Image (cartoon, helix red, strand yellow):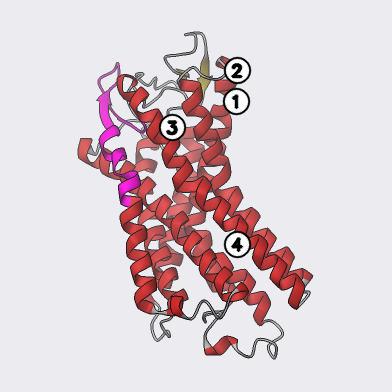
Amino acid sequence: GLEQHSGLTGEGLGNPPNTSGIIPTSSQPPSSCSIDESYKYVFLPVCYSLTFLFSLTLNSVVLSGGGRRWNTSLIYMVNLATTDLMYGLSLPFLVASYMLRDRWVFGDFMCRLVRFLFYFNLYCSIFFLTCISVHRYLGICHPMRTITLESKRVVKGTCALVWVVVFILTCPIFRFAQTGYDQEGYMNCWDDAIDKEFADYVPYGIVLHLLGFFVPFVIIAWCYSQVVRTIFQTLRRRKSIKTILTITLLFALCFLPFHVTRTLFLLLRRGQLGGCNAMKTVSICYKVTRPLASCNAWLNALLYFLTGDKGAPCSSDAADYTVKPFYYLTLILSFIFY
């Protein structure tokens, strides 16, 4: 997955890991197909450690802020910061396992729990970003229709629904993830599924990618396009349009490469695509894109501080946006991340 034992190389997926770092890609490609990924024992611990520190610091500040005027946007942001913080707290276990060269010392239950929490919080973050995008779209493009959606009860209900839906989507991970022992007798925490269960995991993995990322991504992209069109037709602020496009690309950069490479992996391991060379290419790309997805756990909080806009687009504070030269630019910056 995103973290330890990606499975792209078979490690952590039923094939005993080799502590040398040169391991067979899967049970499907020929045995001569091997990948030297010893670099991951330095690269990924460093990336995840930084993500953990940034996520813990920034999201803790967001959650501990007092004296704020609670509105619908802030409710979404607090939920987003909560799931990003929980996401970051799952990383130290993975960092420790990488530093031990893929050895898992925390037991089977913690293996399943850490894997589950990793993906649960990842997709909660994506879903909350989608909710915020729709909320901003309605506030900018259909302000009159948003009045009923400004109810705190409605927003709290939406947030509760997100937690429940994502839990349902990701709870099978708790079953598929498990521990095993390598040839040297060391415990290993598999990410996706062992070989004998992988055929059952593939359909679930594809559905998870579609519902957990690709559908929300389409929704966010559509909301962005409508907001850009509205801004262009009203204020003609080309700088604001460039900003919102930049934020869209940032979201895509964090999540799209990971989900594309992970989907390719599922197909490759099932023998439906390519062979050894394709597996090597996907493996390299996958190792690089995993930390990108993790970065979103602290980028959300960072953008929250940088925007400075702490009011909802349909609140009374937004009524005089034409008098505030920088209000609309701030609103765009906070479109997804606040």
Tell me if 100 is positioned left or right of 222 in this view: left
Mark 2 burial class by Cα count in 10 Å: few <14, some 14-19, many 20+: few
Residue 281 tag number:
1
Q: Is residue 316 above or below residue 62?
A: below
Quadrant of the snapshot with the N terminus: top left
Q: Is residue 10 above or below residue 226?
A: above
Task: Estimate the spatial distance between the alpha carbons at disc 1 and disc 4, rounded to whole Å.
Answer: 34 Å
Q: Which residue does the numbered mark 2 point to in the structure image?
A: 277
Taking depth in this image into account, of 103 and 305 the one nearest to the observer is 305
Q: Are marks 2 and 3 in contact (CB under 8 Å)?
A: no
Give the residues in magenta.
Answer: 167-192
Q: SS of the residue at dot 4? A: helix
Name the amino acid, label 2. Answer: Asn
Q: Earlier in the sequence, mark 2 or mark 4?
A: 4
Task: Estimate the spatial distance between the alpha carbons at disc 3 and disc 4, rounded to whole Å.
Answer: 33 Å
Q: Which residue does the numbered mark 3 point to in the structure image?
A: 6
Q: Is residue 44 above or below residue 242?
A: above
Q: Quadrant of residue 192?
A: top left
Which residue shows up at 29% across the image and 44% down it? 171
Q: SS of the residue at dot 3? A: loop
Residue 61 makes an appearance in the image: no
Expressed as whole percent of the image width and height from the top left, the position of residue 245 reads: 69, 60
Q: Are marks 2 and 4 in contact (CB under 8 Å)?
A: no
Q: Are marks 2 and 1 in contact (CB under 8 Å)?
A: yes
Which residue shows up at 72% across the image and 70% down it? 240
Residue 223 tag number:
4
Task: Estimate the spatial distance between the alpha carbons at disc 3 and disc 1, rounded to whole Å.
Answer: 14 Å
Task: Estimate the spatial distance between the alpha carbons at disc 2 and disc 1, rounded to whole Å.
Answer: 6 Å
Residue 218 tag number:
none
Name the amino acid, label 1. Answer: Thr
